Image (cartoon, helix red, strand yellow):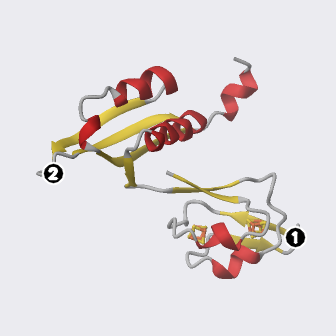
Amino acid sequence: MADNEKVNKKIVAKKVVLHFPKRMIDEPILYHLTKDYDLVFNILKASITPEAEGLMVVELKGDQKHYDQGVQYLIDRGVKIQSLSQDVTRNEERCTSCGACITICPAGAFTYEPRTLVVRFNDARCVACGLCIKACPPRAMELHF
Ligand code: SF4
Ligand code: SF4
């Protein structure tokens, strides 16, 4: 792997609740997340509901691309995912600094720099409400689970 590729890798660690339908309780779903998507998992809680549905709280860790692929795999297999933490990011290449997000964001995560005419995104202020996702004309804002 090239050095600049390593630098560009963004490692994420997120806690999610997985709801497994009855038919899937015995399937090695987490094994596939590790083997096929290189994700590390930590089971925080696991139980079977009275309806025989499997419920698991796990922390998943890996690079953003593999994480997104792993989540898509779970969705495709019929696992319902409830996020305990959502992450909003901005695709810097798409952002045109139009400013449409500034007034819509309730957390003040966007600021306008009059000198450079650039709109900055401070993700530390973001509360993941999702309002900027639709408001952004070039779809630069993205919500990750
Ligand atoms: S609305 Fe989108 S394109 Fe416009 S400044 Fe905000 S993030 Fe950038
Ligand atoms: S998701 Fe909500 S809080 Fe986060 S930047 Fe967008 S509008 Fe602001």
Q: Which residue is mark 1?
A: 117
Residue 87: % across, % down? 53, 55
Relative to 142, residue 76 above or below:
above
Q: Which residue is mark 2?
A: 51
- The answer to whether the residue bearing label 2 lies less than 8 angstroms from the nearest atom of ligand 2 is no
Of residues 6 and 116, the one nearer the viewer is 6
Residue furthest to the top: 1
> Which mark's residue is nearer the viewer, 2 or 1?
2
**Within 10 Å of the Cα at label 2, are there few (<14), some (14-19), or many (20+) other Cα atoms?**
few
Residue furthest to the bottom: 103
**Label 2 SS:** loop
Compared across the picture, whether 26 is left or right of 96 comes to left
Residue furthest to the right: 116
**Within 10 Å of the Cα at label 1, are there few (<14), some (14-19), or many (20+) other Cα atoms?**
few
Instruction: Give residue 105's quadrant in the image.
Output: bottom right
Residue 11: give its label.
none
Sequence-earlier tag: 2 or 1: 2
Position of the N terminus by quadrant: top right
Give the residue displayed 55% in from the left and 41% down from the top: 68
Residue type at the position of mark 1: Leu
Of residues 35 and 22, the one nearer the viewer is 22
Residue type at the position of mark 2: Glu
Q: How far is mark 2 from mark 1, CA to CA?
A: 56 Å
Instruction: Give residue 45's quadrant in the image.
Output: top left
Of residues 117 and 2, the one nearer the viewer is 2
Give the residue displayed 52% in from the left and 65% down from the top: 128
Compared across the picture, whether 14 is left or right of 99 comes to left
If the picture is divided into quarters, which one holds ligand 1?
Answer: bottom right
